[in-house]
Image: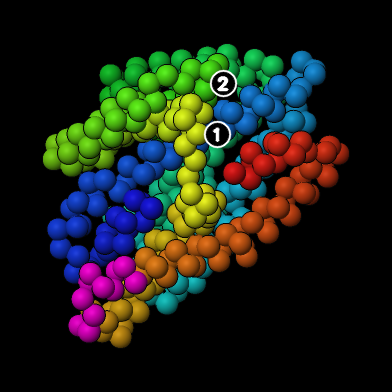
Amino acid sequence: MIVMLVHSVAMPVDVGMGNLVALWGAIGPAGVDLFFVISGFIIATVAVDAGGRVKTRFALSEAAVFGLKRGARVYPIYWVVFGAALIAKSYGVFLAPAAVPDQPLWQLFFLVNPTNNIVMLAWTLVHELYFYVVVTILLAVFPRNMFRALFLWALVTLSFSFYLALRRDPLGGLVPFNPMIVEFIFGIVIAYLIRTGATSHAIGCISLGLVWFAVGAYENHNYGSWQPWQRTLAFGPSSALIVYGFLAAEIRFGWISAKAWRRLGDASYSLYIWHQLIFFCLLKLAQHHGWFEKIPGHYLVPMWMVGVLAWSFMSYYLIETPLRRRLELLIVRAFGRREDKGAVSTVAS
């Protein structure tokens, strides 16, 4: 939601939202950092559960199912948006600043290049997929020692990242050594704490996390520039504290979000992957029909947000979910195994 907020006003032209541009711009992109922590927690938890069901030394079949299901979660709806963006581009819809260079379409299609001039926000999916690949390999080789394997990978990754950063080596900008990988590692630590029953100081962690998040936003906005190390220090630990705090509070105090918020969470990937393209298309229509001269921005932009939310829910129920379920069914059948219902529920979540 906060990523959507910043993209609703981060347009190539002024949309009439005044000071909200700076406010949302200081906070909105940090939704990615929060998501990476959540993703680290979820994927580590699912992988440990999958490894716990393995009775053999290696788990090639289970790892293949795990990795392919992660791909089934990411790629199909991305490909739909990617195709829609190419069509929109042919009609002159703005997709990326001129400073974002054109990339080979096959690299963008398969999400191997974080510099994406067709679906700009898909750079985050490259990091996400890299993390999926790492966990899939570890699950195949160390199914019954997943946390140890994950922590060993984290130690190696952190060592290389710090070393390359100190040397100012350009390799430090590559996805495997990017500082934002640390946020997935925070999620792994949270998964371990929750699994071992550590749920103390929930309220204190939430409070400290929110304060750190606010201070980090102020510092990064005024003195930083969203560079990987700057944003990771500003928002990584704070996101980890917030995520851990709410998980611990759910366990200790029974905090559970209202059904509407959970439904929004279900549709969050469709919301994320579609919203920027829809905003750009609406901007094109607004410029063509002169909407900005007729409707003030503080009315027009909220109307756009409502439209994006409606489209995202439709996408989730009519496109994303059917495609994912069909692919998951094919994956399970291909590997000749019946999926545990609890695992399916967790993966779907």
Query: Residue 219's quadrant in the figure?
Result: top left
Q: Which residue is mark 1?
A: 42
Give the answer, above or below, for where 115 lies relative to 310: above
User: Label 1 sits on what residue type?
Assistant: Ile
Residue 267 inside the magenta-drawn segment: no
Q: In the image, residue 113 lies at what x, y percent?
A: 47, 45
Inspect this view and state whether residue 229 appears: no
Cα–Cα span, label 2 and label 1: 12 Å
Disc on the earlier residue, 2 or 1: 1
Q: Is residue 133 above or below residue 32?
A: above
Residue 24 drawn at (x, y percent): 24, 52
Residue at 69% across, 16% down: 144
Q: Which residues are magenta?
A: 293-303
| Residue 195 marker | 2
Residue 337 relative to residue 77: left or right? right
Q: Residue at x 36, y 70 (%)?
A: 304
Residue 177 location (% of width, % of height): 42, 27
